[in-house]
Image: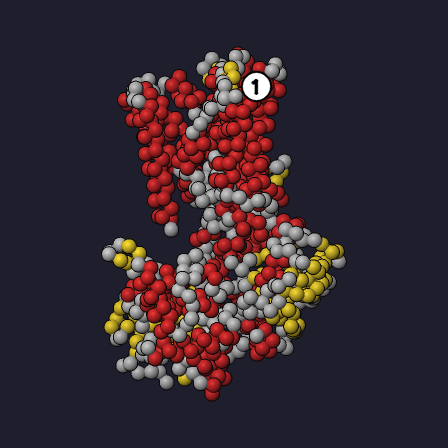
Amino acid sequence: MQALKKKRILKKRIDISGIGLFLILALIVAVLSIITPYFLTVRNIFSILLSVAIIGVGGVGQTLVIVSGGLDLSVESVIACTSVFIGLLNKQGFPLIVSIFAGLLLGPFVGYINGVLIAKRKINAVITTLAMMSIVRGVGLLLTNAKTIAISRSDFGFIGRGYLFGSIPFAVIVLIFIYFLFYFVLNHTPFGRNVYAVGGNPIATRLAGIDVDKYRIMIYTIAGGLGSLSGILFASIVGAGLPYGASGYALDIIAAVILGGTSLAGGIGTVQGTLVGVLILGVLSNGLILLDISSFWQMVVRGIVLVIAVEFDQLKLTKRK
Amino acid sequence: MVSKKEDCVIELINITKTFPGTVALDRVDFFLKKNEVHALVGENGAGKSTLIKILTGYYTKDSGEIRVWSDPVTIRDPHDALSLGIAAIYQEINLPLDLSVAENIFLGRLPKKNGFIYNKKKLVKETQAVLQRLGVRIDPETPVRNLNVGQCKLVEIAKAITRDIKILVMDEPTAALPQKEVNMLFKLISSLKRQGISIIYISHHLDEIFQVADRVTVLRNGKNVGELLAVEENRSQIIKYMVGRQIDEAYPKNEIDIKDELLRVESLTKKGIYEDISFSLRRGEILGIFGLIGSGHTQLLRSIVGDAHPDSGKIIIMGNVKSINSPTVAHSEGIGLVPGDRKKEGMILSLSVEENITLGNQHSYCKYGIIQKKKKKKKASRWVEELMIKAHDLNQKVESLSGGNQQKVVIARLLESDADILLLDGPTVGVDVGAKTEIYKILENLCARGKGIILLSDDLMEILSITDNILVIKKGKMVKKLKSKSATKEELLQSAM
């Protein structure tokens, strides 16, 4: 009896982690560590984690949005514009904490507008966030006249480039903390459970007495906040406010989320899955760099992996039916 | 009077079909002769639609034999059925609305020019020919969206006959049709018959059947209980076959004290949908609302749960006038709804039994904003036990439950939210016979606990036997209030029609 129970628990754990995906990651890691001995060193592992921090934090917000049945393309403009905000305020001589805080407000503000337009005005999420992507990008360019604004402060640089205990990048700690936090939120709070309900069947959820519109607005607002957090990491890593920066990140983020097993139809997905998705992309590009393969190949390989992963997911779905 | 086999188009012999927990069809025989309209009647859940779905390939039989023109055949999917010349027209309209009438009729078989170019001229011409053959006047180029329900039915029929169909199944074809179109449909049916098409006609309305059908087969609880000529003289015999010996014993509601008023609705109006509706619901009462499709009763229920806003009138809950402007408000006022379309509106198929039961009540298991998983699980499992929901564990996804158990999950959610006013829209539609009686028992228990229930149902027997009072709604107006005990099916139907 006890053994049976244990077995069942084990089975459940494996189910949740999305074993197929994990296998793909393990396979890539195995192959790369055989080909290049440097790959599986502590230093390189941290450098991979650092390289995915920006996409990773944005991916958590995108996971919430996609699980709730939406999509957020505006995230890359939020990342760039946040870096611009911080750069400009810093240049004006504001204290660092004020500049960071102002940058952190931008995302939730943009997200809130996204949420209201999508939930209340019923405008399609792709169109709304595409428009917002253009607007926010434009604002960043207007504010800077399309010029890069350097942020040369070592205390700000610490966020994205500093190390704790000698070898652990601070940004990686932020990344891990965000994943733990949202794993907890999604699984152990009413808000988290309702995110799944809203995405699984908004009509039934509404009739069950849940204010679906309010949830949608909250979700986009939080995703915007995480976008700004990504933007802070971005500004710190590059050491500047870049009005043109982060372009194409929205697709990378969405690719990682889908790769992580989140369904575009809504209602299904986990942040741990997204982390695996983010890592697959990170490990792939790291490996290709170590193998000294052209970065153009990285784009090709990334696309192929995405198609394979989604195909895998489809297979699982049809099997279940 | 079982017919001879020689002139049969279709013979269904000894068909048995079981679903988990029930026998839907128990060794049923059914014979369809050439050039006849054969009506299939029976109460809801008698097995009519199961039998039809086996014939059209949506279900596969467990045992028995199907013969077409005396040849044994296997029908594994709808495609097999179509290639044998069998097609069906269902109650719900299932056409791509933005395509034209002609495109709909020839969907997937559009005529081509030079091998690959879409030949619109030919399409329109062929459509005109088909419509003329049916004696229908519709412009082949109008989008189906602009047609009324009756015209859509005609398009479906046209679609079927252009596929060279020999056997046409019509499931409640007159539901939601105005009288004028019903007459047109009947004319069409007799003309199809002359053109050599045999028809299986499913309906609840005996008058219609006597008008169009040649013979009647009666199903009851998954058995063929009789085959008769479709003539007025057989009316009482057919009814006797349909209902069995004792109607009253089927689902008796025990006497429960009806206590103080829970809900009062005063001259509630939503223009063009329902008008001046007033009633009251008391603790321990089941109030039935009966109306034909389109009478506005569903929207009335939706207004009480805050999903549609009435233009005027009052909703009074336990003595206080309330403005219920969203389902969230209704939820906090103790009003819960079991929606008519279970899968689309009632539950979240991708989530587990536990999540579905606790949906909307997550905050009540929280301590410092964190869900106490044990508490939540305990609450959910309590309802699973009490309502006897057949799930192998709480983490099972609801999509893999049977219809009856899914419905119980939705009811469990209302109970978990501790709603006092329960609105149920067709709670036993598509639920097997066994689970049906269990749901009735649950409702009765709830009344004993002091809840008030409003039940919308098309099932005459159900509404008469389990409710205390019945409100009849016709074209948005309240036409009658009845005591269920003394009311009859005829009375109910007559006032609603």
The location of residue A155, given as percent across then percent down, is 55, 13
Image mark count: 1
Is the residue A23 above or below the residue B88 in the image? above
Question: Which residue is at the far front?
Answer: B121
Query: For this rendering, which residue is in front, B384 or A21?
Result: A21
Query: For this rendering, which residue is in front, B121 or B219?
Result: B121
* Quarter of the figure with residue B445: bottom right
Q: Is residue B200 visible?
A: no
Left or right: where B102 falls relative to A133: left
Tell me the chain of label 1.
A
Is the residue A61 above or below the residue B26 in the image? above
* Quarter of the figure with residue B29: bottom left
Q: Residues within 10 Å of mark 1 (few under 14, many from 20)?
A: many
Which residue is identified by label 1?
A: A88
The location of residue A194, given as percent across then percent down, is 55, 43
Is the residue B264 above or below the residue A225 in the image? below
The location of residue A84, given as percent across then percent down, is 53, 22
Could you tell me which residue is drawn at 44 percent across and 21 percent down?
A50
Left or right: where B20 falls relative to A138: left
**Amino acid marked by disc 1:** Leu
Query: For this rendering, which residue is in front, B392 or B84?
Result: B84
Q: Is residue B293 visible?
A: yes
Could you tell me which residue is drawn at 29 percent across and 81 percent down?
B7
Question: Which residue is at the far right?
Answer: B319
Could you tell me which residue is drawn at 50 percent across and 84 percent down?
B236
Is the residue B219 above or below the residue B146 in the image? below
Could you tell me which residue is drawn at 51 percent across and 36 percent down?
A131
Left or right: where B219 falls relative to A308: right
The location of residue A178, given as percent across then percent down, is 52, 28
Q: Secondary structure at mark 1?
A: helix
Q: Quadrant of the C terminus of chain B?
A: bottom right
